[in-house]
Image (tube, grey):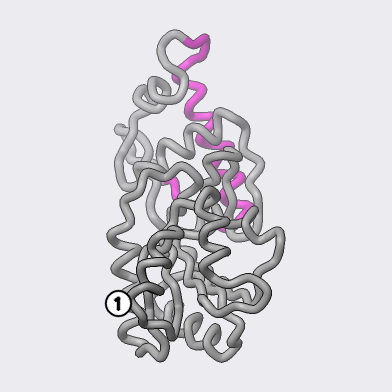
Amino acid sequence: MAHILAIDDDDAMLVLIKNTLQKDGHYVTCISRITEGLKNDLSFYDLILLDVMMPAIDGYTFCREIRDFTDCPILFLTAKSLEQDVQFGFSVGGDDYIRKPFSIVELRARVNAHVRREQREKTKGFSVGSVRFLLVKKEVWAADQKLPFTKSEYEISLLLAGNHGQIYSKEQIYENVFGYDKESDISAITEHIKNIRKKLAAAGLSPIETIWGIGYRWNNI
């Protein structure tokens, strides 16, 4: 599951992309024109599908402008097939091409392959299920809702979600988040977890599982 941004001035193309990728469980946001403030929201996305022939600003130019704002793969949608066009796209920060017209099978295969293989070190943000961590801003979002986490709650959530599926004891959480030189108490972890769960529950989520006698685990839901 990934948060995908599709940018194309062809509304029919956007409908096709959204309907296709949603069947694989992805969240798809569709945009038909590039706006000035768009680059400020890019940390929400795990992959971008970007049409090359856009009005006002072309896909190559936009890709070059946003590379400092996002780590995610950028796949160009284009009818251009000349070798120099492909090379130029890679030079401005693109990761792959999907040539128009393309089949639904190709679209799904290429997108899912990039989602699976994406192993860049995340410096901007990452998603676990429907929860998005914005690393630069140190914020946690559920869909379009910012969760009001304290600094400690954010750090605990980041540890668990960043290693989702792994079980952490209270002692391990305390050591990773606070360190043994800090003036705190391991029992405080229980209260932090309780508060985190309450704020997640307000957004309709409950990803933190208690493994009785061992610790806590963040599940990818």
Q: Quadrant of residue 194?
A: top right
Q: Pinpoint residue 21: horizontal percent, then vertical percent.
A: 43, 78
Q: Quadrant of residue 98?
A: bottom left
Location of the N terminus by quadrant is bottom left
Q: Pinpoint residue 220: horizontal percent, then vertical percent.
A: 39, 55
Query: From this viewpoint, is residue 1 visible?
Result: no
Per the image, is 115 magenta? Answer: no
Name the secondary structure under disc 1: helix
In this figure, what is the number of numbered marks?
Answer: 1
Is 83 located above or below residue 134 in the figure? below
Q: Is residue 177 left or right of residue 120?
A: right
**Residue at horizontal 40%, vertical 91%?**
101
Q: Nearer the viewer, residue 163 or 215?
A: 163
Query: Tag 1: Cα neighbours inside 10 Å, few (<14), some, or many (≥20)?
Result: few
Q: Pinpoint residue 180: horizontal percent, then vertical percent.
A: 41, 12
Which residue in the structure is indicated by mark 1?
109
Q: Pinpoint residue 10: horizontal percent, then vertical percent.
A: 58, 87
**Residue at horizontal 36%, vertical 67%?**
87
Q: Residue furthest right?
A: 36
Q: Nearer the viewer, residue 185 or 76?
A: 76
Location of the C terminus by quadrant is bottom left
Which span of residues is magenta-colored?
Answer: 182-208
Per the image, is 203 magenta? Answer: yes
